[in-house]
Image: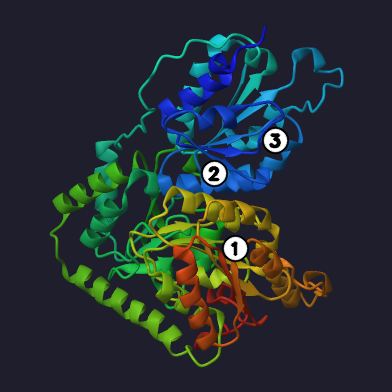
Amino acid sequence: MSATPEQHPWHVVAGTLADAGCDLVVGLPSDEPGLMDAARTTPGLRVLGVRDQRAGACAAIGHAAVSGRPAVLAVNSGPSFANALTGLLEASSLGAPVIVVTTRVPALGIGRGGFQHTDQAAMARPLTKWDFLVEDPRQLTWALRRAVHLAVNGGPGVVLVEIADEVLRAPAPERRPAPPVRRLRFAADTEEVRRAARLLTGARLPVVVAGGGCKPAGAGPAVRRLAELLAAPLFTTAAGRGLVDEEHPLACGLVGLYTTPPADRLLREADVVLAIGSRLEETARMGWDGLEDKTLIHVDVDPAVFHTAAEPEVALLGDAALVAGQLADAVVAEAPAVTAAGAARRADTAAVRAGMRARHSAADGPDLTVPTALRLLQESVTRGATLVQENGLHDMWGYHHPVVSVGDGARVITPGEQTMVGFGLPAAVGAALADRTRRTVLVCGDGAFEMGLAALPTATELNLGLTVLVLDNRGYGWPRFVRAEEGAPDTLTRFTAPAHTDAAVRALGGLTARCTTPAELAAALDDAAKAHTEGRTTVITVPVRDDDVPVGVRRVFDAGPAAGAAA
């Protein structure tokens, strides 16, 4: 006899996840009532129904990034699971705490053509921190709580729990209420901290790089204090953006591919680099001349990060906030708070910041370039908005300070090193659902917007009031740019069919606008602000030129001055 709805194991699963600290279950409804149905009646859980499992995984990433809590993706064996893998690839790249709960077909069907049977663990293993198949009801609550623990502790990431069909048809196990899973925090070795502090205080030009791993630790204030004590230029990775106010006197924007000249000089001339909560992925190293010759102090909660991109002189294993605090205290003990060298560094950083701003202020003319469009967008939504980005050619302008300048109260959500196309819109849905008190805006290309369009009806159903700025080059800009650099044909990168996205937006009650001048864009943004209060989506399209290429891309490809920026 199957279990009654009130006794079903899915209710145990939902209750266990809620107790452990999850607050959102994302997915598509299954044939039979499943986890999403149980979550709807479980206190503390919200359910987000999507049209596409890829979109569901990205929405889970966005929600976790804003809420600071792990998110659950509910799928089933077969195409449902396989379709989510692209989003899970991005979640793994970002270190997003996502718990995937899926089903396994009846054991009698395995190896005998069982309907929708697939080896899910084998497919996902390169992306997951842990996977487990629940084959006995007595394993259920243990496996789920362990999954949440592993998703949030150490380097956060993706975990997978498969539940056998036989378990779901057995009597539900007893569930005892339990406290939330705690994020474990630990400090680094004291002597190694002192050694790192001596290197930092003795440095000619120390530089601090803060990554996305600082965010779950709440390390912003500690990192800022440490940079101030060292008078060190402070950079972030794309994932670390929003950790510190980019108007802080020491803030120099992003590192690597997204560095805005003349801040690249500070990275080039640095002798000691303190990287906190970053794996120093390839994008963070692009265009950074001589990084391998610098003294690296590396801080992370995951020992596997060390000796990956570069070998550190000092590796400090611990929570980003705690270790930054340890380092700050050790720096105070090692050196006076104010030195002539520190004052010189502050003055140099101020000059660099002025140079970054002058470079782009001089280029702000009457034409609607991408930097101008982004400036107008930020003026409309404020520096405290939730900013969701893709990683296409033109929207990469948004990674450049001061083209966009975010405050330390902002939420910034970007794809990771996998840079999945179509990430932005579903991630914005999850982010906006996590915090309705602030504007959520998405900046993306036309190709990425079309690829993520399955998330649009969900945004409408939830009255999220998203604002989307689509930078339209009628195709795929990055492949087109690289092909141009190589003298290769770009025909395949260009769309020839009429765009259908505006019709889809309007059919769902949203607003659309196509703007070719700053005045038109300013008026459209005013309309978007009103539509936001009504819960309606606004999609504003700005046609862009192929040569309006971000300064960081130009710098890395050594192709001359960037369009939209002074030489």
Q: Is residue 300 above or below residue 399?
A: above
**Element type at mark 2:** helix
Badge number at residue 426: none
Residue 226 at x, y percent in the picture: 25, 55
Q: In the rendered image, which residue does mark 2 sit on?
A: 60
**Element type at mark 1:** loop
Disc 3/disc 1 C-alpha distance (Å):
25 Å
Residue 533 at x, y percent in the picture: 44, 64
Nearer mark to the viewer, of 2 and 1? 2
Q: Amino acid at mark 1?
A: Asn
Q: Residue at x 60, y 10 (%)?
A: 136
Residue 412 at x, y percent in the picture: 45, 58
**Element type at mark 3:** helix
Nearer mark to the viewer, of 3 and 1? 3
Residue 93 at x, y percent in the picture: 57, 47
The quadrant where residue 415 appears: bottom right
Disc 3/disc 2 C-alpha distance (Å):
15 Å
Q: Amino acid at mark 2?
A: Ala
Disc 2/disc 1 C-alpha distance (Å):
19 Å
Q: Residue at x 53, y 66 (%)?
A: 257
Q: In the rendered image, which residue does mark 1 sit on?
A: 391
Query: Quick one: label 1, few (<14), some, or many (20+) residues within 10 Å?
Result: many
Q: Is residue 531 left or right of residue 409?
A: right
For marks 3 and 1, the one nearer the N-term is 3
Query: Quick one: label 3, few (<14), some, or many (20+) residues within 10 Å?
Result: many
Name the one closer to the observer, 208 or 85: 85
Asked if the residues shown at circle 3 and circle 2 are in contact, with their CB atoms under 8 angstroms apart, the answer is: no
Q: Is residue 159 above or below residue 205?
A: above
Q: Amino acid at mark 3?
A: Phe
The quadrant where residue 139 appears: top right
Badge number at residue 81: 3
Q: Residue at x 52, y 32 (%)?
A: 40
